[in-house]
Amino acid sequence: MVLKTNITEMLGIKHPIISAPMGPFYTKELTVAVSEAGGLGVLSHTNLFGKNSLAEMKSDMEYVVEHTDKPFGFNIRTSRLQLDAPGLCRGISRFIMDNPKIKEQCVYAVTSAGSPKTLPKAKTYQRLKESGSNIKHFHVAPALWLADKCVTSGVDGMVVTGWEGGGHQSYEKISTLVLLQQVTKKYSETPIIACGGFSTGEGLASALAMGAGAIAMGSRFIASKESEFHDKYKNIVPSGKADDTLWVTGVLGPIRLWKNNYSSHHGVVTSKEEKMAMEAQITPQIAMEDQKHYEMTYAGNIEDGAVLLGQSIGVINSIESVKNIVDDIIKIAEKRLKEANNYIL
Ligand SMILES: Cc1cc2nc3c(=O)[nH]c(=O)nc-3n(C[C@H](O)[C@H](O)[C@H](O)COP(=O)(O)O)c2cc1C
């Protein structure tokens, strides 16, 4: 039995499960594992320790196609403070076009945290599309007004991410449950990936029942044997409770972090207006200073570093192989969907 949806068909994958991008951390091993398990692995936008994000993305893509023949994707954060984003959009499109195996396997580009137009307006991306690539462009929509912007910009699909998710968030604090209903009702023809709070078959079944074609998961995949996250980071997840995270001010927008020294002193967002005024003051220099807290986390300092996690840690009880995670979610989702089907007389 397989769950066939508009997203599995569009991206040529077996299961409607996608790994959510988790920059600035590295996720190439995770990408390979998720794609090999039948989902879609997604490379993150990484630039830790002052590394060049384009060079990192190129070498990650080379690594992925050396280790799997399955489809995969990548993320670019297009925030105004992400100064490397326009160059990354141009450079990676050219790189994909010039590498036949990567061009064949790279089916998904997800942009986030900024404009949905940055990637499609890159001439090299347009040439990549014209050259016969099957790549699809999705953008993250964490609020209905952002979904409106995505659709106006002509995206191929949207990642609808609610407030309970780990990492980057909108200012509106809308749960995945409500946001997904808002977006699927308004844009029933647009392919949608549901994100934020998913970690189980029950979650996948409910997302599909609400009109999404797949789920994307971050926190669940952190707690996998294959993810590159530090063991101390991974170990937070199984013992974590749903209310062990905080919604605080971040450099690229509000973020959900695990409660520790860093998040407790980082400032809770009081209003969208106040947060946006604060963000207007953030310079690229301040953003680079903040990056150090991600480097600390990467090195295992989970008390003082930025530990991004979602409320779904309250549902996750174990660190598993990616294959077990994916197979278990599919098995339970099928069961739940069949049971729900029996309600219909
Ligand atoms: C460690 C971490 C890093 C993240 N970095 C990014 C990022 O670089 N780009 C992005 O679009 N979203 C990022 N996010 C958000 C995820 O893509 C996704 O929306 C979130 O993990 C979903 O919630 P979940 O953790 O409950 O699955 C990050 C999330 C985490 C946990």
Image (tube, helix red, strand yellow):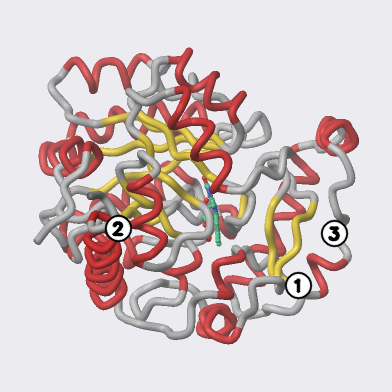
**Residue at the (16%, 44%) spot, across then down:** 105
The three-letter code of the residue at mark 2 reads Ala
Looking at marks 2 and 3 on the same chain, the residue that comes earlier in the sequence is marked by 3
Callout 3 amino acid: His
Front-lying residue, 120 or 62: 120
Q: Residues within 10 Å of mark 2 (few under 14, many from 20)?
A: few
| Quarter of the image with the N terminus in it | bottom left
Distance from Cα at disc 2 to Cα at disc 1:
37 Å
- With respect to residue 199, does 146 lie above or below? above
Q: Residues within 10 Å of mark 3 (few under 14, many from 20)?
A: some
The earlier-in-sequence mark between 2 and 1 is 1
Q: Are marks 2 and 1 in contact (CB under 8 Å)?
A: no
Mark 1 sits on what residue? Answer: 259
Q: Badge 1, how many Cα within 10 Å: few under 14, some, many 20+? A: many
Label 3 vs label 1: CA separation? 10 Å
Vertical order, 283 against 319 (above or below): above
Please indicate, yes or no, whether residue 63 appears anywhere in the rendered image: no
User: Which residue corresponds to mark 2?
Assistant: 340
